[in-house]
Each structure stands twice: as C-alpha cells, then as structure tokens.
Image (cartoon, grey):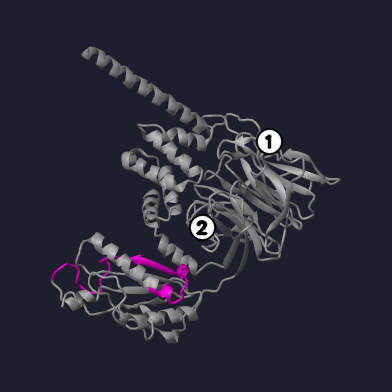
Amino acid sequence: MKKLYTTLFTILIGFSAFAQGSQVKKADRLFNQRAYMDASEEYRLVQDKDQEVLQNLADSYFFTNRMGNAVETYRLLFLKHEANVAPEYRFRFAHALRAAGNNEEADEQMSEFLGTQVDFEEWSSKLDTSVSHTYTTNQVMQNAASSDFGITFMGDRVVFASTRNSARPIYAWNKKPYLDLYVADMDDEGKLANVELFGKNINTDTHESSAAFSKDGQTMFFDRTNSRRVKTDWSEVPVATIRIYRAELVDGEWTNIEALPFTSDQFSTEHPTLSADGSTLYFASDMPGSTGSFDIYSVAVNEDGTYGEPVNLGSNVNTAHREQFPFIAEDGTLYFTSDGHMGFGNLDVFKSEQENGSFGEAQNLGNTLNSEFDDFAFVLRDGEEKGYLASNRRGSDNLYAFSREDYTPPVLPKEISEINPDTGRRQIAGVGNIYFDFDKATIKPESEPTLNKVAEIMKNFPSLKIEIGSHADARGSDSYNMKLSQRRAESTLEYLVNQGIDRSRLTAKGFGESKPLNDCTRPTGCTNEQYARNRRSEFTEVSGGTKTQVETEVQTEDTQDN
C-alpha cells in the first residue's frame, strides 16, 4: 500500500509539472506575439514563477499600463533574482514606481540603473523655475472604451487615430480593434464633433495612425503597420513593422498611396511630421544605427519628389531609450516624447530649439502638461498657443486640448527677505522661529501667526510654490523620526491649505534627524532646549527667478520634558 501511495504521489507531481510547463509555454507564445493582456493572465496562473515568468508577467502589466500590478511583480522579481536581472527591468521598474506615486523608491531604482544619484524632488523644483510656459489641459472626449491619440491639424479640421471601429480585427496587445484614422470638426475650446472615418482608401484592417499634411493639404504622410509578419535580425519571432506612407489628394480622394523609399520590413518608421516649408520630414525609427529603441530622424524632401538619406538628430534629442512622436512647429522648435530624458515618469513631452540647423538640449515641458504616466503626440496650431496631446493618465489613451501662456517665475522682493542667522539661508523678513513639541506633530497656537504670515505672502505671490521640510531631534529611532518628521510636514501643509493655499503649490517632506542645527546628534547629552531647536519645519521656495529660502522654524516649550 505504501508503495502504491508513493507511485500515485510521483504521478501527481509529474502531472503538475507537465501542466505548469504547458501553461508557461502558452504564456510565452502569447508574450512573444505581444498579446500582453492574454499573456499576463496565463503567467498569473503559474504556481511556481521562476525569473523568466516574473520578468514577462511584470512587462505584460507594464506594457498595458497596469502599473500597480507591474510594481508588485517587478518588486518580487528583484527580491528573488536581483543579481541576475538585466538592467532594462530596473529601468521599467523605476518608471512603474513613478506612475504609482512612489518617487522615493523610483529614485533609488533609477539611481541604481544609471549609476548616478537621482533626486526627483530637487529636479522638479528646479524645473519649476525654468519652464517657458504653463499649460491648461482638458480631456476632449469621454471615451473609456477606446483609445484615441496622434491628432493633427488638417486645415480647419483635425485627424486622429482611434480604436473605436468595432468592425476591425482585435489587436492582441491591448484587446482593442486595430487603429483607423478619423476626421472631426473642433470648436474654440478644442472639443471634437462630427467624428467620421477618414478617406476610404487610407484605412485598412491593420493599424493606420499619425497623419501629417502639407501646407496646401494635397499631400499626406501617415503610419501603416505591415499586414504580414516577417523575420528580422532583432526579433526571435516574426513581427509586423510600421512604415510611413505618402498619399496625394486627387479630385477629392486620397490616392497614389505608397511607402516611402527609406522604409523597410526589417525596422519601423513612424510618426511623420513635416516642416512648415515642406522640405524636411521628421519621424521616429528603430532603423540600424539608432541610439535607443527608437530615435528621432530627419530626411530631406526634394522638389522632384525624391528623398535624401535619413539623419539621426543626435544626443541632445535621442537617448539610449525611446524617443517618438516628433512635431516640428512653425518656428522650427521640435517637440517630441521620451522616456530616456529625466521626467515625471514614463513618456514625457520635451522640446528642443533649433539654431543654425542643430537642435539644442532637450527641455521638459513641466508638470502642468506632463504626468507620471505616458504623455505624447504633442501638436501646436500654427500662430496660436493652443494644441493637443495624448495621455493615458486616466487609463486608456485619450486626447487632451491645451492652451498655454508664457511663464515668468515669481521673485520675492528683496525688502521682504533676509538671512536667517541660525541657518545662513534666506527667509521671509519678520517671520519668527517656531518649533514642535517633543514627539508631537501638532501645530501649536503660538505657531499660527507665523504660518498665517506665510499663507498671506503665498496669496500675494500666486505662482509661488513651497517645499515644507520638517525635522526631528535625535531621540528615537531613525525610522520613527523619519515618520514623525513627515507627519510634521503634512500637518504644516494642511494648516496652509486650510488658510486657502492650493495643495498643488505645497510639498511636504520629512528629513528625520538628518539635518540638525546644532551638535545634538545623539539621544542623550543635550538639554531640552538644545534638542528643541531641531524640531522644526522649514519652508523652501521651489519656484522663483532666484532661489529664495523661506526658513520658518517653529519653537514651543517642550512641556513633556519639563
């Protein structure tokens, strides 16, 4: 009998292993076909997930914008297999963490990936003082069921790509129909109406997207995914690449449709945009010689209808990662999307100004336009400060209309600022010193006049943004004091919000016991008064022409120690 049980147990183990192996093979096949929605479900059901299963599962979540699931799976991957994980998974982990709002851990992962220190808060604070415009965005349509992106202007109308055509085959990547081009009217606020399929000769049962038009409206460039998959040097399985096509408007119909001569089945060319004079076409490609997964290129469009050789735009624009969706504005400024330059997470919109035929250093457009998710396909209407972009910040890809205005950073007048004698940093004149009680994060009544004065100044300078940095003394563990200081920063922030200051203008950050104002760095050896000096909140201006520090230090009697 014992022998029988042993035999049955062995059979069951073998059957279980066979079943799991079959499931992994099915998931791998789906993953290699880029059917990430189906692949993630199969990988999720695998009981004993090895390194490759965790990598592919995390990537399946990441590539379909399920960032919470991606964070959990990448974290488990690095917990179990960190020594053997390729660097690109850490790169995606960092971006997933940004999307999840965990900037501190994202900094750690990105610092490890780059081999240099990344400080998101410091970077974003500096960016607030250098952006050229502020943007106001509004979602164009409420369309949770479909994805819309890649909008462009065609005279007084717009053309964009959408998955809303249910008659098309389903794309395995996201389980939505293949993309078609649509045309629509727009009102003064950017809202779209009278949406209809674009010309009958353009759309097919594969993807069409990212149109661009000549000034006279007679020539069109657009993306079309190849209808067949081919083997390439860079992929283990056949893939369908993307090619840029050209079409001409003849007697009201788009015809003479042909792929551009520098495109190929062996690599993708996509997202065309035409210069104002029609002489240069910009596009994205992963053609041989690219720096990253996709780079931005330009190519001459000759008067006889021929094309020059594609030219890579170089390191000011392109990185070792992904640059796509170029848009060349009327003034020659290049706008594009990247996840390789420092940003707010995943794809951000950048600009590069052109001078003497060369493009300058990439500049992030700031957090009034970009989010922690994918923001891309930026277009600007000629002669106006209005345009569109796409973003998946609310789940699926959606179109957003924007308007923008020039941004001049606020500068505090010198007569209301002074140097704090304790810190050597600049603070608002007449703002007194205030401190927290021992082991407390409560704002004391005697602190309120000072905070009210900070609120008043912020109301007088409506573009002023402040970081609240709060601190603890050396008594208690490092981790406890870090949490305590964070609570102090948050209670200070909430007080200012209650005084009418918009929450978006305030950042709360706890520093624990890491930045004392004196030598009291141990839990014993100092008087209560000496420890009390380190229990403070500091208010640092993070937007201004010249960085002004507003150091407000809160001191109250340490009643618990006396």
Q: Is residue 334 visible?
A: yes
What's the mark number on residue 371? 2
- Count the labels in the image: 2
Taken as a whole, is the magenta stretch helix, strand or loop?
loop
Asked if residue 477 lies left or right of residue 489, the reply is left
Residue 170 among those drawn in magenta: no
The magenta span reads 495-524
Pick whichever, 142 or 538, lies toward us: 142
Residue at the image position 36 percent from the left and 83 percent from the top: 449
Mark 1 secondary-structure assignment: loop
Please say if 484 is above or below 434. Answer: above
Mark 2 secondary-structure assignment: loop
Percent of width and height locating residue 477: 21, 61
Q: Earlier in the sequence, mark 2 or mark 1?
A: 1
Percent of width and height locating residue 270: 63, 44
Q: CA distance from mark 2 to mark 1?
A: 33 Å
In the image, farthest residue toward the right: 251
Mark 1: give few (<14), some (14-19) or many (20+) Cα within 10 Å.
some
Q: Which residue is mark 1?
A: 205
Please say if 441 is above or below 94. Answer: below
Please state which amino acid type lies under the numbered disc 1.
Asp
Percent of width and height locating residue 116: 38, 54
Please state which amino acid type lies under the numbered disc 2.
Ser
